[in-house]
Image (spheres, helix red, strand yellow):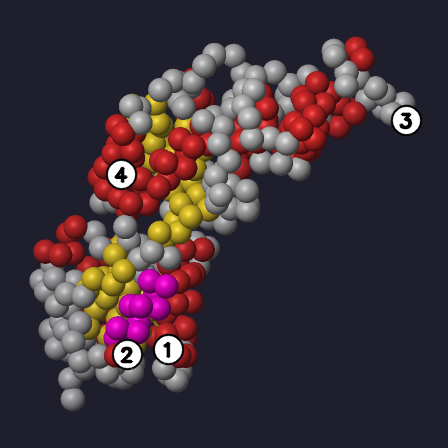
Amino acid sequence: MADNLSEVPVENGRDPRDDVQGPVTIAYIAESAGVSIPTVSKVLNGRSGVSDGTRARIEELINRYGYRKPSGSRNNTVELVFRELESMRAAEIIRGVGRVARRNRMGVMVSELGLHDSPGRTLSEVMDRRPHCVVSVARLPEAERDQLSGKGIPFVVFDPATELPDDVPFVGTTNWRGGRSATRHLIELGHRRIAMIGGPKDMPCLRARLAGHGSALEGAGLPVDPSLIIHSPLTRADGCAAARRLLTRPDRPTAVFAANDLQALGVYKAARELALRIPDDVSVVGFGDLPVVAWADPPMTTVHQPLTEMAMAATELALALGRGEEPAQVGLEIATTLTVRSSTAPPAE
């Protein structure tokens, strides 16, 4: 093994470092060694739990590429990163992160990076604080993941809204199961014409909810009618517009399942405008179980997404990664449940 950079062997006239563009990161070392980032972190910090052969391979790569740990220790804080903090979900997420942080004698820093700001500039502010770990809500682009890995800051994506590589830690929920349970509930009540207001097609969590809806229909021997599926943004106004299209059809559906609670509240508004009663004329099911839907008129049946429990699990995972541990699973899904209230009933004769 080479003890310094001058002793790195040159093979076929080429220095192996020639293939590296820019500074070597811990993520690059992990990829080159065929191991996870926590395993490299264990070696860098002199921790146990790594086989002699793997440790030797990692140390050889560290020396070969001249990798040096980022200077400065990490702070005793969990950085919770939102893209949009003005969300009805934020309070439950902050509550879950705070519970685990307090239990581990950690502080919590809440950041809002924004959807359209420069990722490099805004994320640099997070990295300058040197948090123990990062929990990023919904999104963490590849460039940002590489930046955090390069600084040795572990991260977890909470409720991811985009596809992630297999080795990126995340905590989500059982979206397919939730979609299936919502539609099954309506079928068991006797509904046969069930519409769905889906969300943007590029979000995997929403595609899973739609797939669960279709699975429930097929399982009951009912056709999946594309004309009863409308995709729209996840807002009350867009849910209302989609519901108007569905509820003004001559053969209008007797029930509507919406991909999130805000869309479902839009269905309430459209029904009132059309003088339709919920659930007498149309049953409505949402997804998320935001606190506000229990106070809707009538209280809304919805799929409960356990945001506080998800946030607690994400924080536990991030802290474990920060300690250099290698968890049994880097991807976790917390189960959804159906909360039945007064917005669903058997269809009118």
**In the image, residue 306 lies at what x, y percent?**
27, 50
Indicate whether residue 44 is drawn in magenta: no
Residue at the spot of label 4: 96
Earlier residue among tags 4 and 1: 4
Residue at the spot of label 1: 217
The quarter holding residue 233 reads: bottom left
The reply to whether callout 2 and callout 4 are in contact (CB within 8 Å) is: no
Mark toward the viewer: 3 or 4 = 4
C-alpha span from label 2 to label 4: 34 Å
**In the image, residue 78 lies at what x, y percent?**
35, 27
Mark toward the viewer: 2 or 4 = 4
The quarter holding residue 216 reads: bottom left
**In the image, residue 22 lies at what x, y percent?**
66, 22
Amino acid bearing label 4: Gly
C-alpha span from label 4 to label 1: 35 Å
Stretch in magenta: 177-186
Q: For the C terminus, which image quadrant?
A: bottom left
Residue at 15% across / 68% down in the picture? 343
Earlier residue among tags 3 and 2: 3
Residue at the spot of label 2: 187
